[in-house]
Image (tube, rainbow, N blue to C red):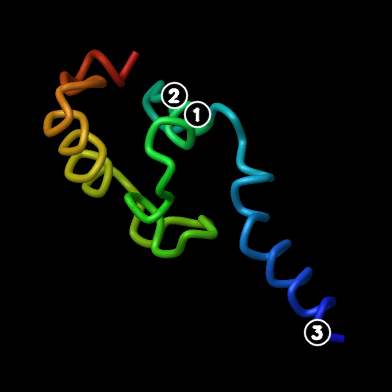
Amino acid sequence: MKLRLIAIFAITAFAGSAFAADVMEFKRGVKFNHKAHQELLKDCTKCHAAAAGGKIEGFGKDFAHKTCKGCHAEGKKGPTACKDCHK
């Protein structure tokens, strides 16, 4: 029984990353390479509320402009200009 619970927990914990799309397309021509960010950051909680991933609460224009653009500016890597994301 204990082994089953551990297996269920492991499957649940890693299911978000296992089923996430490699590249996601959003409004206004924005493409997001989820797989590349997973490999680079290795910490899902930089964007997601939990390490298991899942839907990002409050995701939208304001979140992306603050969180994504802010992370790119801070790390000096990735797009920060409008035309770099909106194609």
The Cα–Cα distance between marks 3 and 2, rounded to whole angstroms, is 42 Å
Secondary structure of the residue carrying numbered label 1? strand
Q: Is residue 81 above or below residue 64?
A: above
Sequence order check: which comes first, mark 2 or mark 1?
1
Mark 1 closeness class: few <14, some 14–19, many ≥20 residues within 10 Å: few
Label 3 element class: helix
Lower sequence index among marks 3 and 2: 3
Instruction: Give percent across and percent down for residue 47.
Output: 35, 50
Q: Earlier in the sequence, mark 3 or mark 1?
A: 3
On screen, residue 83 above or below 15? above
Q: Which mark is residue 2?
A: 3
Instruction: Give the labeled residue for mark 2.
Output: 31
Residue 81 pos. (x, y %): 16, 19
Which amino acid is tagged 2? Lys
42 over 27 or under it: above or below: below
**CB atoms at circles 2 and 1 under 8 Å apart?**
yes
Residue 8 image position (x, y, % from top left): 76, 71
Task: Give the quadrant of the C terminus.
Answer: top left
Q: Secondary structure at mark 2?
A: strand
Name the side, left or right, on which 8 lies relative to 31. Answer: right
Q: Which residue is mark 1?
A: 25
Which of the two discs, 3 and 1, sits closer to the camera? Answer: 3
Residue at x-position 17% and y-position 23% = 80
Label of residue 75 in the image: none
| Mark 2 nearby-residue class (10 Å; few <14, some 14–19, many ≥20) | some
Q: Amino acid at mark 1?
A: Glu
User: In what quadrant of the picture does the N terminus appear?
Assistant: bottom right
Q: Amino acid at mark 3?
A: Lys
Q: CA distance from mark 2 to mark 1?
A: 4 Å
Give x and y (percent) for residue 23: 55, 27
| Dot in front, 3 or 2 | 3
